[in-house]
Image (cartoon, rainbow, N blue to C red):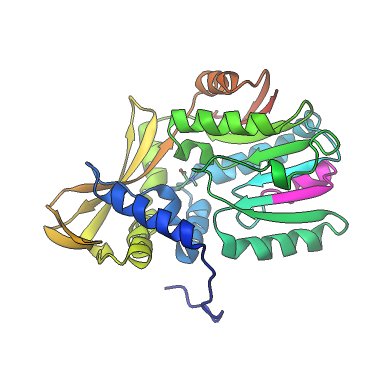
Amino acid sequence: KVVSSRPRISVESLEDAEERLHSLEAGLLEHPPRIASKFFYDEQGCALYEAICQLDEYYPTRTEKAIFERYRSEIACHLPQGGQWVDLGCGDGSKSWPWLPAVAASRYVGVDIAKDWLGSTLMTGAQRCPGMEFLGVVTDFTRPLLLRAVMRSNTTLPPIFFYPGSSIGNFTPAEALQLLCAIRAHLGPEGRLLIGVDAPKDAQMLEAAYADSLGITAAFNRNVLRVVNRLIGSNFIPQRFNHRAWYNQEENRIEMHLVAREPQTVQIGTRRCQYELGDTIVTEYSYKYSPERFEALLGMAGFKEIRRWSDPASLFNVYVAAP
Ligand code: AVI
């Protein structure tokens, strides 16, 4: 349990809370039941995800970091200088900080669903880069991306949309295409997308990354049931579910599930839902894209000039895409 001395104060939009309740309840009543992966990231979920990123088995974070460190100045040559840095899913902002001087950014727009983090992320950025302007935006990428109102004119301050960590893989390819189209629509002539995307590979390596030996990913997965209980008043008992993750080769995706360890009844809204031994709840898909497939997706979204950097073992790819 994360022990925090901060007072537990939060502010909610009534419409958002209502919509969340409906979508969670509807997902849980689907066949198979589903919890959207955005619900992983409460305070405890964010801490567990940070721990996952440090695991030996979880290669994407360190591989992407190595590509960035090795090729930063080369990549920066293909990005506009002096523009605005739009950090999609900024978290603590740490992946962005080394880029801001590399592209002489004059403005930082941090976008995240986790509003509790945003304030301290912006403060950290402002301390590191005095003179730059910092703005935080709370939104959820499963909604239409509408950032034009908060971005300064994109011709005087060309935007660089930064979407690292293969977060695009947590959408279905159709949803990913929609998001890429929305990003493309925000760019103007000089804007660019800088995105990190995990590649398909040996199933054993992939499965180890999502079912680590310390059980951190299992805790991350089960934690979502605590989040759901808090948000919709259900009474899931996380220990009654096993974490399972496997690579679905046909779909090129890791699937994460919570599998009932025993028959049980769970109160969800006004319904009592019965789970039998082995029944599963889908909690996450993590799609992996070969360069050919991802470049085709970028092309469909209207990107024309695409450049790619990779690690020596081709585990992970970083792309700069221009309209
Ligand atoms: C945030 N996202 C890119 C991670 C992934 O690899 O799909 C989330 C994650 N799930 C389990 N481990 C990490």
Mark yes or no: residue 214 visible: no
Where, by quadrant of the figure, is residue 252 drawn? top left
The magenta stretch spans residue 56: no
Residue at coordinates 56% horizontally, 42% vertically from top-left? 165
- x, y percent for residue 81: 85, 37
- x, y percent for residue 36: 39, 48
For the view shown, which residue lies furthest in the right direction?
131
Where, by quadrant of the figure, is residue 286 drawn? top left
Q: Nearer the viewer, residue 156 or 193?
A: 156
Q: Is residue 270 above or below residue 303?
A: below
Q: Report whether 260 appears left or right of 124.
A: left
Residues in magenta, as a range: 95-109
Q: Is residue 197 above or below residue 65?
A: above
Q: Nearer the viewer, residue 129 or 83?
A: 83
Residue at coordinates 27% horizontally, 64% vertically from top-left? 234
Q: Report whether 259 appears left or right of 152.
A: left
Q: Quadrant of the C terminus?
A: top right
Q: Nearer the viewer, residue 1 or 208?
A: 1
Q: Quadrant of the N terminus?
A: bottom left
- x, y percent for residue 65: 63, 43
Q: Is residue 288 above or below residue 146?
A: above
Residue at coordinates 81% horizontally, 42% vertically from top-left? 102
Mark yes or no: residue 300 visible: yes
Where, by quadrant of the figure, is residue 93 drawn? bottom right
- Tag count: 0
The magenta stretch spans residue 104: yes
Q: Is residue 118 above or below residue 258?
A: below
Residue at coordinates 50% horizontally, 24% vertically from top-left? 290
- x, y percent for residue 167: 52, 41
